[in-house]
Amino acid sequence: MSIDAAFLEALKTLLERRVSGFRELEECQQLTAGASQETYRIAVKTDEGSRRYAFRRSQPSQQGAPLPGQVGLATEARLLQLAREAGIPVPGVVYLLEERDNLGTGFLMQWLEGETLGQRIVRAESLTAIRPQLARQCGETLARLHAIEVDDSIARQLTTVTPVALVQETWNAYQALDIPAPMIDYTARWLLDNLPRRSRQTLVHGDFRNGNLMIDESGIVAVLDWELAQIGDPVRDLGWLCVNSWRFGNAALPVGGFGAIEDLLDGYRAQSGVTISAEELRFWQVFGSFWWSVTTLNMAAAWRTGDTPSLERPVIGRRSSEAQMDCVNLLFPGEFTLPAETALDRGTQLPMPAELLAGVRAFLTDEVAAGDKQRFGFLAKVAANSLGIAQREFLHGPRLGAAEQLRLAALLGEGSLDALRWQLTRQLRNGLSLATDGLAAHLRQTVAGQLYIDQPGYSALRAE
């Protein structure tokens, strides 16, 4: 993505002033562009060689105002400083932006090297030796985090929440979507009936999980993404780390897909002297999946309204069922039956919509991943066309099919759409008169409707 020239000039001016021996800005690559914040990787040439930094700032349109539930970047920078003082591995803050920098609100921080992708953390061969130690390290790190004392100036910037308020607010957010998902309602009721009998209040990270930890062969390199920090029940952080969504397929190891709960709690107890019961942890595991089931739906809702255009958001919305099933398994596990697989070519069209989608999936996995640039443009158009066909099928197919069925029933009598299609085909093969009343009109309308789905721009659909 292109970077604004005025932004680059302001950044160079800042680096000239703040980086000793600055010679030139070698690289400025935007890594993320969230709804309210941007992150960049910066490489600077100095008299002593190259240095790398990470740079976080608010979106210019946000004018420094965090989204609801998020802390501002100035507060996040201060939390990183406190965490570093407490012995928690985090990037060091190099500089906090000032108004004269003309870069908005944000900060420059140390660039660290390590693995942050959850899938790789649970599978990478290079991390095989350290993985069994990570759960205990997480417990020790969280104990130190929860012991951080925040002064009044920082506390005023953080939301203070109770377990009951968290459950009710999340339930209210789901109900505002006006969609039926009974398992979410069931879980909310269970949580309100099983609130923790004891609940401390400390600094809480709010998003401590596999995916927000940087790991290398020595263990935790950094705890990242402090933007959801709050004052609340510290066991929430431990429960969130154990939510199945963050095990990345390795469900046998509940702590982030890399460790055992016993090691997590032992590390926490050894560092803090506080014993966490299985009952407390289970509550916050259930809450974590409950919260994620609602949050994913809200992401999809924000995509639907156009507030957060994204290819990923609508797909994330369908992950709500994952979190709901995690709640099922935590609250009332048992046997269940899955539907039998259905052949992609089931039906009377050639190809069927499911076959088109299968072709697109194969393209994305086999062609896009392979990165054949010479063929990419053409194949991308083919993939887009296939998706367009499938989309029009889902949008218009049911209505067109129902109308086709009514016409066939008038011609042939009652029956399912597929059965009537087959009946008309067989009758035409067996001598049905081509002058049969209504036959031509039916075929004309049926073919036009199908062509509209398949290729609406084709010239034969234009009125003479």
Image: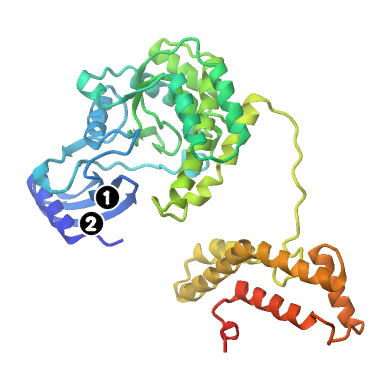
Q: Quadrant of the C terminus?
A: bottom right
Q: Is residue 380 above or below residue 74?
A: below
Residue located at (41% from left, 32% from top) = 207
Question: Helix, strand, or loop for circle 1?
Answer: strand
Picture residue at 89% right of the left edge, 78% below the top: 427
- Name the secondary structure under disc 2: strand
Point out residue 51 in the picture as x, y percentages from the top left corner.
20, 48
Q: Quadrant of residue 322?
A: top right
Quarter of the image where the N terminus is located: bottom left
Q: Would residue 397 be seen by someone viewing this image from the given angle?
A: yes
Asked if the residues shown at circle 2 and circle 1 are in contact, with their CB atoms under 8 angstroms apart, the answer is yes
**Residue that extends furthest to the bottom in the rendered view of this protein:** 464
Amino acid type of the residue that numbered disc 1 sits on in the rendered structure: Arg
Q: Say how many tags the image has.
A: 2
Task: Tell me which label, 2 or 1, sits earlier in the chain.
Answer: 2
Instruction: Name the residue tied to disc 1.
Output: 41
The scheme the figure's colours follow is rainbow
Q: Which residue is mark 2?
A: 27
Q: Residue 460: where, in percent of width, then height? A: 60, 85
Q: Which mark is residue 347?
A: none
Q: Position of residue 300 (x, y in %)?
A: 48, 47
- In the image, taking residue 132 as reference, residue 203 lies left or right, namely left
Q: For the point 26% across and 33% down, which residue is it?
A: 76
Tell me the distance, in whole angstroms, between the alpha carbons under discs 2 and 1. Answer: 7 Å
Q: Is residue 313 left or right of residue 161?
A: right
Q: Residue 211 in the image: state x and y as whole percent.
A: 43, 39
Residue type pointed to by label 2: Glu
- For residue 251, say whether it is visible: no
Label 1 crowd (10 A; few <14 / some 14-19 / many >=20)? some
Disc 2 packing (10 Å; few <14; some 14–19; many ≥20): few
Residue 169 versus residue 28: which sits nearer the camera? 169
